[in-house]
Image (cartoon, rainbow, N blue to C red):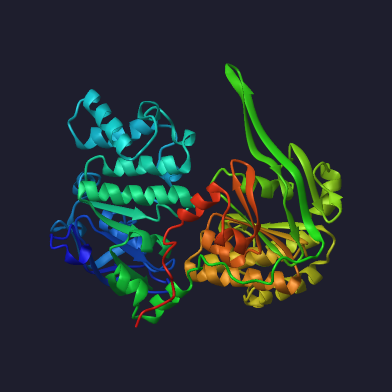
Amino acid sequence: MSAENSEEPVLQVRGLSVELPKGTDRTYAVEEISYEVRPREIVCLVGESGSGKSVSAFSVMGLLPEGQLTAVAGEVLLQGENILEASEERLRALRCTRMSMIFQEPMTALNPVMTCGDQIDEVLDYHTDMGQAERRAKILDIMEQVRLPDPEKMIDAYPHQLSGGQRQRIMIAMALVLDPVLLIADEPTTALDVTTQAQILKLIKELQTDHGTGVLFITHDFGVVAEIADRVAVMQWGRIVEFGTREDVLSRPREAYTQMLISSVPSMTPRKRGGVTDAKPVLRTRDLNMVYGSSGFLRRDRKVHAAKDVSIEVRRGETLGVVGESGSGKSTVARCIARLIDPTSGEIFIDDDDIARLGVGKLRSHRRRTQIIFQDPYRSLNPRRRIGDSIIEGPTNYGTSVAEAFERARELMALVNLDPNSLDRYPHQFSGGQRQRICIARALAMEPELLIADEAVSALDVSVQAQVLELLDDIREKLDLAMLFITHDLRVAAQVCDRLAVMSKGEVVEYGPAGEIFNNPQHEYTRELFAAAPGRDWEFGKFVA
């Protein structure tokens, strides 16, 4: 569509350079970049963290932090008007009316003490002279357009009362309520499960077509690129290294960097692995239940069955994947197994020991047997502690001498492909992928029998993700570990899991060898889950000459 689109671009970026503060690892956050977005076109900006994608978007919106990032060259033309020369008052007038932005995390972008209706109303009240009744009608109309259920109730709801997908729809409603010509979406689906992600992507495509809006879509997910992009700009170290149609960039990439990124995308075709092992199970759960309840003054008792009769097992040297939508019960099951929360009923066996009902005193000796790698390594590590101290903390709490624990930490750093001499550095001195490797080393320091990875690679760039997945698989094989791998990314599950448990509304609805489930899913929910995966029909890494 876009290649033949002869309309004037809504956005033209020409030779834009944004300078970084002195003393950083490079001079420019973005350097001499040029691209354009036309009406009813989606241009995807892709690249690894630090490539300059978000800086480019913030430059367009006039949101560069003063004194930290400075545009020193080039033009950003919104329908011919140079944003870089606009006053702050003019920028406020342009935001929402002619250009809008959807941020990655709606819960931090939305005001928690304002109703969703009031937050959309704030846009209308500031930028229009509509009366209150007219504004309310407009809010209800845009809520219907973004497919929010029961707008009459939703208008008075607070953000915390909505699901992640509904909060993102509120953000889209705020962004589009005044029909801007340009919509910038900065990783708006990264934290969403595949079915919600599919709904949001479809919604953005429909709305931008109906409203004639040009969309600049920032993502590191090539499945999303394959699903929605008209054209693609690939960024590396602040420069655009490749720009072309979706088909050209994904199927005929010219640059080695682009080829590397695309080749790193996991395939939806399951890897042929060694098969289900006959080793003794390290983990077994039987009829595991977790019921959350709440009650109070003038409030009826409300119970949520977060995990319902869950029976799974993981053997030594095996990876069991747990997949499903947000709220399906995946993380609840993991936290029950690690005894971070107490299950309502059921059994949890680590080897032959049922730890489901153990009290705090007796549980301590079992803690080291199960370790978790969490989704966000920066939040998992204490920013004020050197990483060496973080790695040795667990072993020394269980009686290992400091000298012995540090020697083991050095060995583990080498195992996760990091410099053993960097133990005296702090978390902020490492990249996101390196921090996740540190978290893996910290978990292994306890010499666990079961390793739980809870969305451990979902926040990582595709190239870093591939490295961490390969590392986890290598460690599982070398140490003969049992691994419970929780993810909403079906591509990742296809590559790392021997068996699969598909969860929906707290229940395991399908369970068996990963290859069988991917190739012939039996349950309707599993089929719907696989059908929603973005770019599911695209063969990444198979380039055409």
Count of marks, rendered view: 0
| Residue pictured at 22% horizontal, 51% vertical | 213
Image quarter where the N terminus lies is: bottom left
The image quadrant that residue 537 belongs to is bottom left
Q: Is residue 200 above or below residue 68?
A: above
Q: Is residue 44 above or below residue 239?
A: above
Horizontal side of residue 363 vs 110, given as left or right: right
The image quadrant that residue 249 belongs to is bottom left
Q: Nearer the viewer, residue 427 or 465?
A: 465
- Residue furthest to the top in view is 298
Q: Nearer the viewer, residue 90 or 441?
A: 441
Q: Nearer the viewer, residue 135 or 521?
A: 521
Horizontal side of residue 303 vs 140, given as left or right: right
Residue 271 visible at all? yes
The image quadrant that residue 250 belongs to is bottom left
- Residue furthest to the bottom in view is 545
| Residue pictured at 83% horizontal, 41% vertical | 359
| Residue pictured at 77% horizontal, 41% vertical | 346
Horizontal side of residue 298 vs 253, given as left or right: right
In the rendered image, residue 291, in percent from the top left (x then y), is placed at: 67, 35
Q: Nearer the viewer, residue 435 or 245?
A: 245
In the rendered image, residue 80, in percent from the top left (x then y), is placed at: 13, 58
Residue 424 visible at all? no
| Residue pictured at 68% horizontal, 75% vertical | 415
Horizontal side of residue 114 vs 464, given as left or right: left
Image quarter where the C terminus lies is: bottom left
In the rendered image, residue 436, in percent from the top left (x then y), is placed at: 59, 64
Q: Is residue 449 above or below residue 365?
A: below
In the rendered image, residue 504, in percent from the top left (x then y), is placed at: 58, 44
